[in-house]
């Protein structure tokens, strides 16, 4: 069967295609991408749990090609132990759970700043006015970015994500290159400043991070900062957007949450399973491997379809049913093991607080368009825009 994750049909709704893959071709060769794809939960889970077999190679950099903003060093998601172990241990010092927990009051304050102008409006684009700016502001403040550069950061982040869609239009590629150059220059200058002018931010923590006389190089800090910017923005933006769109398509579940705010954490987890913000991650086989769905030779690039694995009926009963009461324990929306998403606690915190504000501090809303355009990306899934109409008549 033919399967192209970048086709408009798959971008609009990949899940029927995933079902067909799991049932007919759970291990499939994708000729246009020169790689294999795994769609069943058991196979994806096995790959995540066995990094010695499914190596984190330089595939991300290869996929971005000349649009890679940091070509000099591997991305941490493309590293294997012991290099990954060293970098992750040092990076954890700038993204420790205790730091994330202290952020909640500030996250709530930012949410209220964004919600205030929405009140009284009859229609908004959720992505442009709320779900996009929120994580941009949060991660920018964590990195030590000046408030006046927030808009630049959002443009840079969006453009780098656009690169994963493999655009062919040369004007679009030139715009991406300009954004990447600006982003890189900004971070390089900030890293050097933090060596002599430390602040209370993640960049300073990364500059000062040391473990057994081992420190991060400027290029490694640059790559980490870019990755945190991308992951910190896109994952949370899409988590919020996917959650709102899913709730609007499931009014009975929406009513349950409105009646009981204690369901918000369960809502976040079920959205992560049902419509995963990150759909695909990359691996490379270090040896020939026999899987439940088939065999893959050594030295092959592999797509792990997280979005499909989280809808596998072999792991989650009635997987296409959105059910807040479900316990989706074991979902792999944030990966698993040594490459488990560094920003997962922050995404959950932002998602939970953002949805609470939208559902309980705003008027009831509905979708203001019949068709919601999805982001054209190989990696992430979420609405490009999400027009909402508020019920001002009942105010």
Image (cartoon, rainbow, N blue to C red):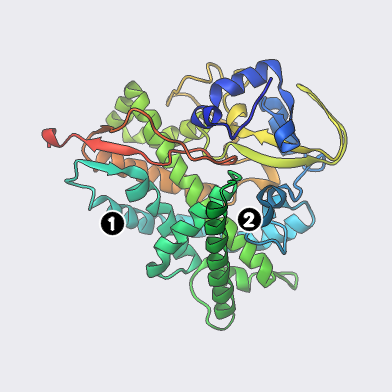
Mark 1 or mark 2, which has the lower sequence index?
2
Residue at 75% over, 73% down: 213
User: Quadrant where the N terminus lies?
Assistant: top right
The dot on residue 67 is: 2
Residue at 77% over, 42% down: 51
The picture places residue 97, in percent across and down from the top left corner, at 54, 55
Q: Which quadrant of the view contains residue 293?
A: top right
In this view, the residue in front, 30 or 388, is 30
Left or right, 245 with respect to 78, comes to left
Observer able to see residue 345: yes
Observer able to see residue 312: no
The picture places residue 22, in percent across and down from the top left corner, at 66, 20
Q: Disc 1 designates what residue? A: 113
The dot on residue 151 is: none
For marks 1 and 2, give the one nearer the viewer: 2
In this view, the residue in front, 344 or 278, is 278
Helix, strand or loop under label 1:
helix
Residue at 60% over, 19% down: 19
The picture places residue 312, in percent across and down from the top left corner, at 61, 22
User: Quadrant where the C terminus lies?
Assistant: top left
Q: Which quadrant of the view contains residue 340?
A: top right
The picture places residue 322, in percent across and down from the top left corner, at 45, 23
Residue farthest to the front, as pictured: 170
């Amino acid at each position: 069967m033919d399967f192209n994750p970048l086709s408009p049909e798959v971008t609009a709704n990949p899940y029927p295609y995933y079902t067909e893959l799991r049932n007919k071709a759970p291990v499939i060769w994708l000729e246009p991408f020169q790689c294999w794809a795994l769609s069943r939960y058991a196979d994806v889970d096995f790959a995540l749990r066995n990094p010695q077999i499914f190596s984190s190679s330089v595939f991300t950099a290869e996929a971005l090609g000349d649009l890679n903003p940091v070509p000099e060093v591997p991305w941490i998601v493309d590293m294997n132990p012991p290099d990954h172990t060293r970098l992750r241990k040092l990076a954890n010092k700038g993204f420790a759970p205790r730091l994330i927990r202290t952020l909640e009051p500030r996250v709530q304050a930012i949410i209220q700043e964004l919600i205030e102008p929405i009140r009284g409006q009859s229609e908004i684009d959720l992505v442009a006015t709320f779900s996009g700016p929120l994580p941009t502001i949060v991660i920018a403040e964590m990195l030590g970015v000046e408030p006046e550069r927030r808009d630049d950061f959002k443009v840079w982040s969006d453009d780098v994500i656009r690169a994963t869609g493999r655009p062919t239009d040369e004007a679009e590629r030139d715009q991406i290159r300009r954004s990447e150059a600006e982003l890189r220059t900004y971070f390089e200058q900030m890293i050097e400043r933090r060596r002599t002018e430390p602040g209370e931010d993640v960049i300073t923590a990364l500059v000062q991070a040391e473990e057994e006389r081992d420190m991060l190089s400027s290029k490694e800090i640059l790559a980490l900062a870019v990755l945190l910017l991308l992951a910190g923005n896109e994952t949370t933006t899409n988590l919020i957007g996917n959650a709102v769109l899913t709730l609007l398509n499931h009014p009975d579940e929406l009513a349950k949450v409105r009646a009981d705010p204690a369901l918000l954490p369960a809502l976040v987890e079920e959205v992560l399973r049902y419509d995963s913000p990150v759909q695909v991650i990359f691996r490379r086989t270090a040896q020939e491997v026999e899987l439940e769905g088939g065999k893959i030779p050594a030295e092959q690039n592999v797509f792990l379809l997280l979005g499909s694995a989280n809808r596998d009926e072999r792991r989650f009963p009635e997987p296409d049913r959105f059910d807040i009461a479900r316990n989706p324990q074991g979902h792999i929306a944030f990966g698993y093991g040594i490459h488990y998403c560094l920003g997962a606690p922050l995404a959950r915190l932002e998602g939970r607080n953002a949805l609470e504000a939208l559902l309980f501090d705003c008027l009831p809303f509905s979708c203001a368009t019949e068709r919601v355009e999805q982001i054209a990306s190989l990696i992430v899934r979420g609405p490009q825009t999400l027009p909402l109409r508020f019920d001002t008549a009942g105010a």
